[in-house]
Amino acid sequence: MAKKIKGLTLHFMPYSEIARLESVERIKKLLKIILSNKVVVLQGRLSSEEETRLIEDTMIMVGNIKGFKGVELAVIEQGDDLTAIQKLRFGIAKAITGQQNALTIIGPATIVKEMKRNPKKLEVMMR
Amino acid sequence: MAIRILRNFTRRLFGLFFKKRKQIRLGFYGPPNAGKTTLANRICKDWTGEEIGKVSNIPHETRHVQFKEEVEIKYKEKSLKFKLVDTPGIATKIDYEDFVKMHMNKKQAQKRAKEATKGVIEAIQWLDDMDAVIVVLDATQNPYSQVNITIVGNLVARKIPVLVVANKSDLKKAEIKKIEAAFPEYDVVAISAKKGKNMDEFYESVFRLAKQA
């Protein structure tokens, strides 16, 4: 029988909630939720520079906040399994329409054990 | 971000027109335990006879950026000088208890974890100072981890040329095709840094990479 997960909270966040924020504020907002032991499911994705900043800020917090061990992070995006031409077409459409056809999952490492991702699926394993 | 890109671009432009670059700053990036230091050591030993740093099976052995200056690599009667920059593995989580499980005492493990977090930050901060980067991946591990994608995405955003190395290709579990599929836009070279397998093709790729730097 599968183990019962106690007290898991998923925080679904539309991209519009962080769209107008500066990068630093975006990351701060996400990390604040994660620190309250929730798993964030964000519509869309951060820029690669914001993702790096998130890792940096996470590492600072690991060194300074007792019991915080970091985060598990994964992004699943439409287009991961497309060919180069399909990707280009999809990229142009995305640039025009401003769509956020991606999902970013970020959770505290104390709750999320592992995220396994391949082009077709994302598996989130809890502790 | 825009300032960084402009700075890199200006630096390259000046380098191109006003003086020949003395040495190419070649960074080694990737997740922990992918074999970055093993590869940097292999290159250093091949061309200078010395090593750059210590290696270990326990993750986060490299917790500070380490260098080797003036490494002259020769390939087909051409030679190029590199400054090799070996960086700590980039991770999103560090738990001292993982080190305890690897037979480290609690105090040592906590110290290692603390240094490792600082190492990750240091590695990220060095990204801007690279002319070219080798992303070292463990070919037995899933290449689709977000850390790998974030590193490559950052290099692309900074317009830094990338070479992907699928290390540990000598192991049975190695899946080179999976790495090629994960990074179809990049040159992927399968090697075993530990055993020195396929190093000729690797050096050929490094010269191609240096041309873009």
Image (cartoon, rainbow, N blue to C red):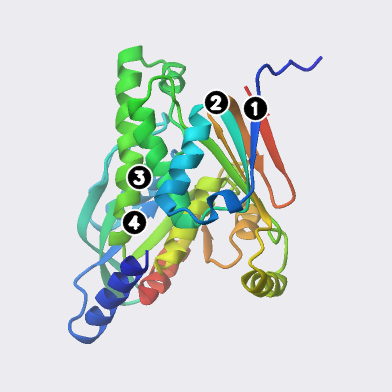
Chain of the residue on which disc 2 is drawn: A
4 vs 3, front mark: 4
Q: CA distance from mark 2 to mark 1?
A: 8 Å
A68 relative to B131, above or below: above
Tally the marks.
Answer: 4
Pointer 3 residue: B37
3 vs 1, front mark: 1
Residue B127 marker: 4
Pointer 2 residue: A37
Chain of the residue on which disc 3 is drawn: B
A96 relative to B114, above or below: below
Chain of the residue on which disc 1 is drawn: A
Instruction: Tell me the SS state at disc 2.
Output: loop
Q: Confirm or deny contact between disc 4 and disc 2 (CB under 8 A).
A: no
Give the amino acid type for the residue marked by disc 4 in the picture: Leu
Q: Are marks 2 and 3 on the same chain?
A: no
Pointer 1 residue: A9
Give the amino acid type for the residue marked by disc 2 in the picture: Asn
